Image: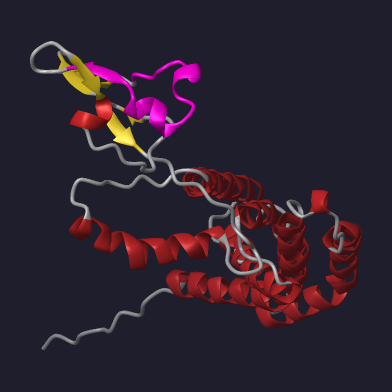
């Protein structure tokens, strides 16, 4: 039964002793007071039916709640795909059938959204910090842009790596991508430094980029190769304990590989574009002379 007081609705469950409720007949023989004070069997004044009910009643902020839980088979779908299907197919029709019911999504979906937002903010702060450090060291605000252009290149490798291994993009994958952002810039720093040295020696921007890639290719390739090979044993580990780390390692290994190859082409090109833009900005604009009669 339930009653309402000053603090809201309160549910009270009355239950007989275990020895007095062993069967349905014990409930039907329960004596209750009648209209004239005599006690009659419950079966004479009530219709008793067996139904399913809740073993506990849970409330959140005074609202009765029901928690629905389930396990996910990753071979069929991941949590993100299930949540997208739930929000697009089921939840829009729920208010029409049950106007008084509201839905709150908790569990892995809530944790992923919270952690993903925090990871995005921290990654932006980290990139800003890297940019400021490079600007202070290089004494320029344009050259760090060419170096940081290698960071989006790692995303290409992350996607390709997960597709090759049959992995789903998840929160650990994003953690690996955030970690990758601080690694892929190393190759671009080397290329930018050598291009600057060649420019100071009198080479043109195109020739400087070509010579920098040719001279530093072996060092860049071996540095990235040793890192990828070191991640190899964990990348192909099939034990249950390693499954949580595989998305992180896949992001690092494949992202670093693709970013290393693409940075050999993209970084010199971005440096040349920025150099051309800076030259155009500094070039004086000729003034036409006007003859006065």
Residue at image point 36% right, 43% down: 51
Could you tell me which quadrant the N terminus lies in? top left
Residue at image point 91% right, 66% down: 222
Judge by depth and name the residue closer to the eye, 277 or 178. Answer: 178
Judge by depth and name the residue closer to the eye, 127 or 169. Answer: 169
Whether residue 155 is visible to the viewer of this picture, yes or no, is yes
Could you tell me which quadrant the C terminus lies in? bottom left
User: Which residue is farthest left?
Assistant: 36
Location of residue 11 in the rendering, given as x and y in whole percent from the top left corner: 28, 22
Disc count in the image? 0
Task: Specify the segment rendered in magenta.
Answer: 14-33
- Left or right: 61 as drawn, with respect to 35: right
- Left or right: 241 as drawn, with respect to 116: right
Location of residue 101 in the rendering, given as x and y in whole percent from the top left corner: 25, 46
Location of residue 61 in the rendering, given as x and y in whole percent from the top left corner: 29, 27
In this view, 2 is above or below 267 = above
Location of residue 2 in the rendering, given as x and y in whole percent from the top left corner: 22, 23
Whether residue 197 is visible to the viewer of this picture, yes or no, is no
- Left or right: 105 as drawn, with respect to 262: left
């Amino acid at each position: 039964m339930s009653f309402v007081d000053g603090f809201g609705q309160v549910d009270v469950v009355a239950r007989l002793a275990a020895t007095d409720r062993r069967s349905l007949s014990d409930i039907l023989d329960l004596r209750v007071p009648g209209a004239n004070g005599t006690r009659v069997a419950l079966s004479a004044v009530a219709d008793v039916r067996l139904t399913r009910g809740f073993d506990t009643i849970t409330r959140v902020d005074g609202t009765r709640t029901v928690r629905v839980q389930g396990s996910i088979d990753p071979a069929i779908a991941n949590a993100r795909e299930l949540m997208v299907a739930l929000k697009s197919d089921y939840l829009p029709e729920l208010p029409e059938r049950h106007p008084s019911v509201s839905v709150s999504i908790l569990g892995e979906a809530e944790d992923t959204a919270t952690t993903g937002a925090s990871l995005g903010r921290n990654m932006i702060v980290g990139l800003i910090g890297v940019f400021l450090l490079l600007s202070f060291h290089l004494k320029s605000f344009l050259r760090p842009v060419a170096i940081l252009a290698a960071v989006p290149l790692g995303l290409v490798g992350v996607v390709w790596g997960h597709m090759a291994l049959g992995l789903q993009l998840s929160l650990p994958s994003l953690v690996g991508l955030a970690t990758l952002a601080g690694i892929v810039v190393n190759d671009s720093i080397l290329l930018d430094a050598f291009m600057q040295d060649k420019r100071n020696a009198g080479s043109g921007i195109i020739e400087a980029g070509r010579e920098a890639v040719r001279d530093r290719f072996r060092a860049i390739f071996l540095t990235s190769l040793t890192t990828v090979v070191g991640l190899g044993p964990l990348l192909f580990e099939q034990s249950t304990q390693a499954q949580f780390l595989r998305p992180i390692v896949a992001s690092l290994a494949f992202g670093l590989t693709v970013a290393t190859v693409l940075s050999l082409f993209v970084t010199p090109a971005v440096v040349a574009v920025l150099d051309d833009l800076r030259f155009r900005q500094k070039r004086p604009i000729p003034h036409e002379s006007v003859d006065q009669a």
